[in-house]
Every structure is written in structure tokens, then in C-alpha cells.
Image (cartoon, helix red, strand yellow):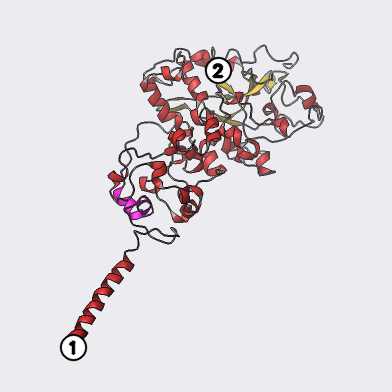
Amino acid sequence: MKRTIFLSLLLSIALIFITSCKEDTTDAPVDDPATQTLAVNSCEGCHTNYETLKAVYTPDPPSTGGGGCGGDAPHYEPYDRVYLDSEKGYADFKSGFHGSKLECTDCHNGVDGTSDKNEAHSGDFVSHPSKQAETFCAPCHKDIYNGTKNSLHEQGLGQKRKVFGRAGLGSYDDLSAMMKDGYDHNCAKCHATCGDCHVLRPAAGGGGLYSGHKFTKTPDMRDICVTCHVSRGGHAYFGIARGTVPDVHKSELEFTCLDCHTQQEVHGDGNVYEHRYQMTLLPKCENCHTAIASSNTYHSVHLNTFSCYTCHSQDFNNCGSCHIGEGARIPSYQGYKIGMNPLVEKPYKYALLRRTLSAPDSWMDYGIDNLASFDAFPTYNYTTPHNIIKWTTRTQVEDGKPCFDACHIITEGDSTRNKELYLFNEDLLDWEVNANSGIIVDGQLPAGWEK
């Protein structure tokens, strides 16, 4: 009897231990993170547990700047931005190289094996490793890193050049701390690290993980590219603006960005360029459109004089002007202007121009009442809108009319037609006159155009 009771007691104790072991399996690694729950005392365990993230998250600090020229970004809660969602790519991440071969701390540093957020994020923790690409990306992606480290895509050198140049300074480093802060909060949101294109949602789109930490080799055109290249690229390409239609490369060919813009061009070739039109790898219309010099009257007369966009673009978005920090004073608008080509890098005499947002007092909220050398650059830039169509209001004429009827300036009695297509001095605001003196068409149009 005693022996039976003793054996029963041993069996009960064993069952307790067995049951406990079965219930406490979350500390062990699992093969399928999409269907298992990990312990919260690990990096992945915490970031795959939505309720834990909500319990320990730190609220965002108050906003200290505007949303940039694209407006305020959509808001995602801090815990949503770092949630490893198995339904949105986390399982794919775990099966890929970065998720299966590397530990979280290999890229993010910090401390694994703890449920204490402060300890996990202590010491040399790095939230965005690609901001230190030389350390975390270059060892495996050396060639790409060597290309991107000086690229316009990552560094924003074209924008920075306009800011310090108009301020009368020799380099971006010469700007005051206040001006740099203004640039960071209002202008730099769309210049990206590797992770901003391949892992994250761009800051302009709200930031955070785009697809459960999945590394996407080819970024989604709408969700990634167009998030930054919005009204002056994506919206034009999709024909979103009133009165426009999608670009012919979209409507007829279903091209994505990378059908024209190569991987090497997007990543950069390692050289420093002052603006994007100096980039030698930019796509050219003639790469695809060959043997067009004498294909019609328009081309045989104007192909070497006008950029292709002066005939084949629809109306496009122009900025107006804004206060950095306060936003637009002159709202953006759809318009169209042809002027003198401001770029020595382009062979045309005439080019399509886009109005920019800068004004002499744009930076008054950041310590400069008026930019000392505002006239160093025109306020109308050479532009290449992504809204190409074959037949436009300038290439279509009524039966019996000459080919130039819709584009040359023509005076008939007391009325003048087509003058609004061109940038004249009278189109400029007072503070724009000196800056644009070299690109207005006054006295520069061919003889006989103004009849």
C-alpha cells in the first residue's frame, strides 16, 4: 500500500514537470515564426508580440518641423513601425539570407536575451543600420555602397547646393546649425539610405518597416518610389492631376521606374554630381526612339533645338513658393512654360521649365531674413515631367492649319495665341526677375514667330 502511494506520488510529480515543460516552449527557437509565439525575452520575441510592443512603446516626441515639400507624412504608431508582422513579410524575412544567417544584434547591436527594453536598446544599439552603411552594409555589398555613398539619391547634393548657394556660402557645411536643422526637417525627408528603399517605408510615407522586415530587392514602384517622387513624378506618370492622362509608357507599355532608370543609375556610380542632369547614366529618349530625326516635320525642324519634353509633355505640377517651416504661400499649380535652356549639360537652346518653391525670404524662420545670393540660380528649373504622350495640344493642329499653329506665337488682329506657353519677363514676380534674366525668351525667339 505504501509502495503504491509512493509510486503514485512520483508519477504525479513527473506529470507536473512534463506539463510544465510542454507549456514553456516559447524560449526555444522555432522553425516557422509565422505560426509560433516566441518568448518576449528576445529581440524577435518582443517584436513579434504586438501587445508587448504596445505596452512598452515610447511615444513620438512633438514635431519640430514641417512635413517637407510633400506635406505631412501619414502617421503610424511607433509599435506599428517596428512590428514584425508574419502576415506582411516577416516569414519571408526569416527564410531569406538576412533573417536566417544573421542575428538581430549583427546589424542592430544592442543586447539580446532580455525582456527589458532599455537593456535591449542599450549601449551601441542602432535602430537604422543603413544610416551607418559603411559598417553594416558595405562588408557584403561593397560595390553598391561605393556607388551610393556619394549619390544624389542618398546625399541630396542638388538640393543642398541650392540652399547654401543662395545663402551666399561655399558649402553645406558652412550653413548655420539652425539652417541645417531646417533642411533636415523640411527638405531631407526624401533622401534615402539603403534601408529606406529595401526594408523600410520611406519617411515621407510614414516610416517604419514596410513588409515585416523583408528585404525587397526591387522596391515597389507605388509604395516606395512614388512615396518620395510624388507630384513631380508619380502623380504625373499615373495621370492623377485633373485634365491629364497617364504617361504613354504606363498606359501602353506598363513600364515601372526600373524599365528606364537602371539599377546602377539609381544606386549611383560613386561620382559626385551637383545635380541629377549631370548623371551620365540617366535614360535618354533616343535609347529607345531611334531614327526619328527625319520621321516627321516637327523632328526635322526642332529635334536639336527643343528638348523632347517641350512638345510631348502635358501640363505638370509647379511649386509656387513657400516659407521653410510654414509651408506654401503660393500654392502649387498645373502649368507649362518653355524658356531658354539653363543647363550646359543639355544640348538644346530651348527647354521645358518648372517653377520651384524658393523665395528670398524662404528661410526667415531659420535665421536668414533674405538669402544673400538668391539670384545665383533661376527659380525656373530644367524639367523632365513623367507625363509623356505622343499627341499634345502643341502637336495637334486643325485640318488645313500649318504645323506650327498650336505652338508658335501668332498675332491675329488684336489677339495673340500661344504666348502663354513661353516664359517672358512679364510672367515673373518682382523678386524673380533678376534670378531668371538668363532664361526668359524676351528677344530670343526665332524671327517671324510673333506675327
User: Where is mark 1, residue-wise?
Assistant: 1
Left or right: residue 437 versus residue 323 is right
Compared with 113, 414 (above or below) is above
Residue at image x 29%, y 46%?
117
Quadrant occupied by the N terminus: bottom left
Give, as a three-letter code, the residue at label 2. Answer: Pro
Return the residue found at the far front. 3
Image quadrant assignment for residue 387: top right
Residue at image x 73%, y 17%?
449
Left or right: residue 382 versus residue 5 is right
Identify which residue, 6 or 426, lies in the foreground.
6
Give, as a three-letter code, the residue at label 1. Answer: Met
Image quadrant assignment for residue 380: top right
Residue at image x 33%, y 45%?
111
Which SS class for mark 1? loop
Tell me the CA gap for discs 1 and 2: 103 Å
The range drawn in magenta is 38-64
Residue 145, percent from left and from top: 52, 33
Quadrant occupied by the C terminus: top right
Compared with 323, 119 (above or below) is below
Identify which residue, 384 or 217, lies in the foreground.
217
Residue 231, percent from left and from top: 54, 35
